[in-house]
Every structure is written in C-alpha cells, then in structure tokens.
Image (cartoon, grey):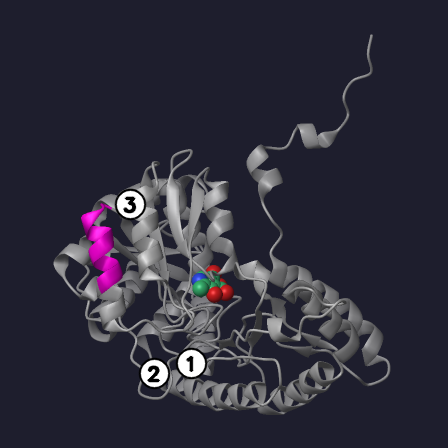
Amino acid sequence: MSAPDLNINNLFSQKALLLEESPTFVLEKKADELDLLLRKDGDAVIRFGIGQPDFNTPDNIKNAAKKAVDENKTKYTASTGIIELKQAIALKFKNNNNIDYDVKNIFAGNGAKQVLDVIMRAFINSGDIVIIPKPYWVSYAQQVILSGGEPAFVDFTKDLKLNIDNLRYIVKNNPKKIKLLILNSPNNPTGAVYSRKELEDIGEICLKNNIYIISDEVYENFVYGTVKHFSIASFSDELKDITITVNAVSKTYAMTGWRIGYCAADLQVIKQMSKIQDQSASNPCTPAQWAAVEAIGGNQDSVELMRREYEKRRDLVYKRLNKIDGIKCSLPEGAFYVFPEVSGLFNARIKNAFEFAGQLLEQAKVAVVPGGAFGNDNYIRISYATSLEKIEEGMNRIENFCKGL
Ligand SMILES: Cc1ncc(COP(=O)(O)O)c(C=O)c1O
C-alpha cells in the first residue's frame, strides 16, 4: 500500500492558493521587525507604507460608541445595518453627493473592503471579467479572483488616469462576459481625481455595453486646491441605475479600526448582497455602527481640519520628490498618496521598484510600497498620512539614498 499523501496543499482550494498576500501588510511586518531592532538605538523606520490616517478618531464619535455600549446597544442588528445608520448614509448621499437613495438602497458592512467583497460575490460567475484600471488598489484584483472571476486591466496615461482608448479596446475585444468596472476616484495609489467629463466618458462606455460600475469613493473628502470630487451615480438616472457607490467611515473620520463601510445601489443588488451578508459576516459591530451614525450625521469640522493638514503634507512631499534627480512625480489631487516614477534610478543592483523599496527600507530605514503591488513596478507609493516632521525626515533619507545610487 502506498503512503497517504500528507501534503496539506492538496486540501486547500485553488482560489486560496492563488491568492496573494497583501503587500502593504507584508511590508509593515518587515518594517516592524526592523523598527524593533532600531529602537534600541533611538532610531526608527519612517513609515510611508500603510494607507492609514495618523489622526485619532474625533471625540464626538468615540463618545457615541461609549454611550451605545452603556445603553447596551451591543446585540445583533439587521445584517445590513441599523436603520439610524442607513438614514444618516442616505442623507449624506443626498446632501454631499447629490444622489437620491431610499434607506432600502443602503447596505452597511464591515469596512469598504468587506462591502466590495460582497459585491463581487453577488455578481461574479466563474470566468466573468471585471475591468480594473491600473494602477489599482491591491485588493480589487484579489477579490475578483477569490470570487472566481478574472481581472482585465486597463493601462494608464501619463497623468496616471485610465486610458480611455485602451478601455474601449478591451470592451470591444474581450470574448468573455464583462460584468463590472471598478472606478476609484480619488485614487489609491496615485491620488488622481477624475473630472466630470472623464467620468462621463467612462460611464457612456459602461451604459452602452451593459457593464455595472463599482465607484469606490472612500477618499472623496480629501481633494486639494480647487479640485472637486464627483460621484458618477449623480450624473443621470441611467448611470445611477448601473452604479454601486461604495464608501466608508475609515479614511474620512480616521476610523480604520472600527470597520464600518457602506454602499448604495439598486434594490435588486442590495437584495442579493443582503443574502450573502446574512449567511456570512452578519451585522457590522453594533457600537461601531452607532459611532458611524455620529460620524456621518454629526459635526463635520474634524474632516476639514484633516483635509487641510493632508494638503500641507501633499505639497511638501511633492516639492521634495521633484527635487530629486531621477524621480518623476505628478501632483496628486486627492487621497493621501503620491505615486512617483523611480525607474530613472534603476541600476545593476536595483532593477525594479520592489528592489528599490527593499533597499530603501534596509539602507535608509524608510518604508514605501513598490508599485508592482498596484500593477506597475516602475513606481513606488508613498503614503503621507503622517506628520510634517516625519515627512521632512523621510524625504531627507530618500534624497540621500537616491544620491548614493
Ligand atoms: C481605495 C480603497 N478602497 C477601500 C479600502 C478599504 O477601506 P476599509 O478600511 O473601509 O475596508 C481602502 C483601504 O485602504 C482603499 O484604499
């Protein structure tokens, strides 16, 4: 008798095996290890890696959660969220985004990431195509794969936005069923913000070709200068019908750990998503939902304070990066990221952004994310959700590192 096959990998699903680790989390782990070593000497890694606000959650929001706990609002709720939260979200869509939704059209989940995962599962059959413009937030493609779908990537132009001719080409020439297109403006990792006209052009292609739109607007409040954020669903009833607008309290209110995200969509979509939520995650954390009611419906002063602070940081990072020989960087109009091209600095030792980021961490003690994680390894992503002092210090280190290449 032959010995039983004890290779546990034979037991795992192909989907799980195909999934990639989140590069930002891998990098943070590496930076943590290095930090632990360095701190003994009073030095530390400058973190430009993770996309997380360095601000604390505002007090009014924390107090709302404390009150909810004291009032024993700690039990299960409807899997798609409490009515008070849905009312606050519907009102926010009306007032801030000019989109009219009933509370029945609202779905609240465990962060935008989990809401996006439920959307993918509601739409995708094995082999279905989801269009993802490059460079993209890392989880989109992985979530599509986890649902059995296939991502089709669209190239980007010099200004780091979707190449509309390439989109037209992909839509025309892909023999498989194209179900969804994911839009993300303001964008992670580039900070690019799409104009009304750019969104209208994309919307027209989707309408003509029966492609549903996921519009991820989690950075909507962080736009700079005279730039405006537009919600594609607000342009017409036709576009509203084919768009799922996704958002979260995570970035806007510095609430990444509270895990409240949401979306608004056609009733048919919400119905399918609700079944999935009922049978999987169930409701998002109840006190966190009450905190989100206060965040979305309460005083908004903290958002503007954070926005102004991010704008100062953006200006500093942009100015410093453009002074470095070999780095090219366009001005990001939103979010809290810059996506500079570093291929001008590649040499025999550093052949791509992955090696660039690795050496930068080891030698200069600065953590950035290599662009390969977002679909292009000539770039790096710098998150400037950190203090001006840390940005100055980090930029000094990057500048010195680059001079030595
Ligand atoms: C573009 C984008 N969408 C969604 C998310 C996920 O947000 P949440 O923390 O609410 O799950 C992120 C987080 O980094 C993001 O950058």
Q: CB at mark 1 closer than 8 A to ligand 1?
A: no
Q: Residue furthest right?
A: 41
Spatial CA span between label 2 and label 1: 8 Å
Q: Nearer the viewer, mark 3 or mark 2?
A: 3
Question: In the image, what residue type sits under mark 3?
Answer: Lys
Spatial CA span between label 3 and label 2: 47 Å
Name the residue tied to disc 1. Answer: 60
Q: Which residues are magenta?
A: 201-210
In the picture, measured across the screen, residue 101 lies left or right of residue 51, that is left
> Residue 67 appears at what percent x and percent y?
44, 72
Nearer to us in this view, 136 or 85: 136
Q: Secondary structure at mark 1?
A: helix
Nearer to us in this view, 64 or 9: 9
Considering only order in the chain, which callout, 1 or 3, is on the residue closer to the N terminus? 1
> Residue 109 appears at what percent x and percent y?
40, 55
Residue displayed at 28% across by 59% down: 83
Question: Where is residue 405, by image quadrant?
Answer: bottom right
Q: Secondary structure at mark 2?
A: loop
Q: Nearer the viewer, mark 2 or mark 1?
A: 2
Name the residue tied to disc 2. Answer: 299
Q: Are marks 3 and 1 in contact (CB under 8 Å)?
A: no
Q: Is residue 209 magenta?
A: yes
| Quadrant of image for the N terminus | top right
Badge 3: residue crowd in 10 Å (few <14, some 14–19, many ≥20): few
Q: Are marks 2 and 1 in contact (CB under 8 Å)?
A: yes
Residue 240 against residue 395 in the figure, above or below: above
Q: Secondary structure at mark 3?
A: helix
Question: In the image, what residue type sits under mark 1?
Answer: Asn
Q: Residue furthest left?
A: 237
Name the residue tied to disc 3. Answer: 172
As drawn, the label of residue 231 is none
